[in-house]
Image: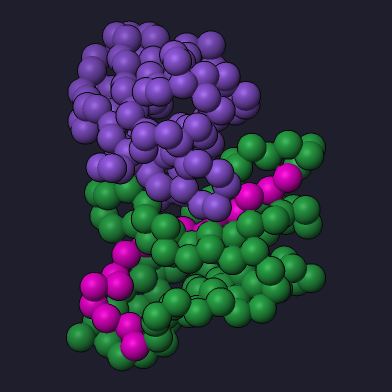
Chain colours: A purple, B green
């Protein structure tokens, strides 16, 4: 058990490009969460998966954002037509139940 | 009013002192409360959880919860320079009856422990 793994650690992209991030949760954790954190703020909830089902989405998740968790294992978060306002740290967390969860190391996105 | 609000920082304390971090929340239906520590450039790390009124101690950390006042705090005793970080309060609210474990975070309080 190596914890929650996120890839890549850093991503620099030009405005308008599409990006995809990957999260590998702790094995057998059926709950998976995505958050976004901008400088000086706490993390903000984006979406939640229980197994392969996406059960909750924040209004922050505009139609440019899509998340998947095929087969209830790893998850991907895609941002289409990136904007400078998308620059942030994208955090993934997993949990077997709700007793507080562990975050991955995050993917820092910079849109130039 | 913000859903979760933390005392404004930054907070600076001398080594060995007690650091007190405070947090208030707006949703009376909140069930679970957490404190995360975040070092610069790193992801948040869970350090304390508390679910019922009163105090919960874990080493040098004590979390205090008062649901009637909608208040949760974190005390760090014998503060060390390595405790210097941003501390995030997080609340599992149950707005609408379905929370799925979603956490609402405060903006964080920066703590500096100086030798």
Q: Position of residue A43 (x, y in %)?
A: 46, 44
Q: Is residue A60 magenta?
A: no
The residue at the point 48 percent across, 66 percent down is: B48
Q: Is residue B82 magenta?
A: yes
The residue at the point 74 percent across, 68 percent down is: B67
Quadrant (top left, top right, bottom left, bottom right) of the C terminus of chain B: bottom left
Give the quarter of the image for residue B68.
bottom right
Q: Position of residue A4 (x, y in %)?
A: 32, 39
Residue A40 appears anywhere in the view? yes
Q: Which residues are magenta?
A: B78-94
The residue at the point 32 percent across, 16 percent down is: A20
The residue at the point 71 percent across, 54 percent down is: B30
Q: Position of residue B14 (x, y in %)?
A: 30, 87
Q: In front here: B23 or A20?
A: A20
Q: Position of residue A96 (x, y in %)?
A: 50, 41
Side of B111 relative to A65 (left or right):
left
Q: In front here: A102 or A59?
A: A102
Residue B5 appears anywhere in the view? no
A99 vs B58: above or below: above
Give the quarter of the image for residue B26.
bottom right
Spot the residue most to the bottom.
B16
């Amino acid at each position: 058990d190596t914890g929650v793994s996120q890839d890549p650690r850093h991503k620099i992209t030009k405005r308008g490009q599409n990006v995809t991030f990957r999260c590998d949760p702790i094995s057998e954790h059926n709950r998976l969460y995505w958050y976004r954190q901008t400088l000086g703020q706490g993390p903000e909830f984006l979406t939640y998966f229980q197994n392969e089902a996406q059960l909750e989405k924040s209004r922050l998740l505009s139609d440019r954002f899509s998340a998947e968790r095929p087969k209830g294992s790893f998850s991907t978060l895609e941002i289409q037509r990136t904007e400078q306002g998308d620059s942030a740290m994208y955090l993934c967390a997993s949990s077997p139940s709700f007793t507080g969860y562990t975050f991955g190391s995050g993917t820092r996105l910079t849109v130039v | 009013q913000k859903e979760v609000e933390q005392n404004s920082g930054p907070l600076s304390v001398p080594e060995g002192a007690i650091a007190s971090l405070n947090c208030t929340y707006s949703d009376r239906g909140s069930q679970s409360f957490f404190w995360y520590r975040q070092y610069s450039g790193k992801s948040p790390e869970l350090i304390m959880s508390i679910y019922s009124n009163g105090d919960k101690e874990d080493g040098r950390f004590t979390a205090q919860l008062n649901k009637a006042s909608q208040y949760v705090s974190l005390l760090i005793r014998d503060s060390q320079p390595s405790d210097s970080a941003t501390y995030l309060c997080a609340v599992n609210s149950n707005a609408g009856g379905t929370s799925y474990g979603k956490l609402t975070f405060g903006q964080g309080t920066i703590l500096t422990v100086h030798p």
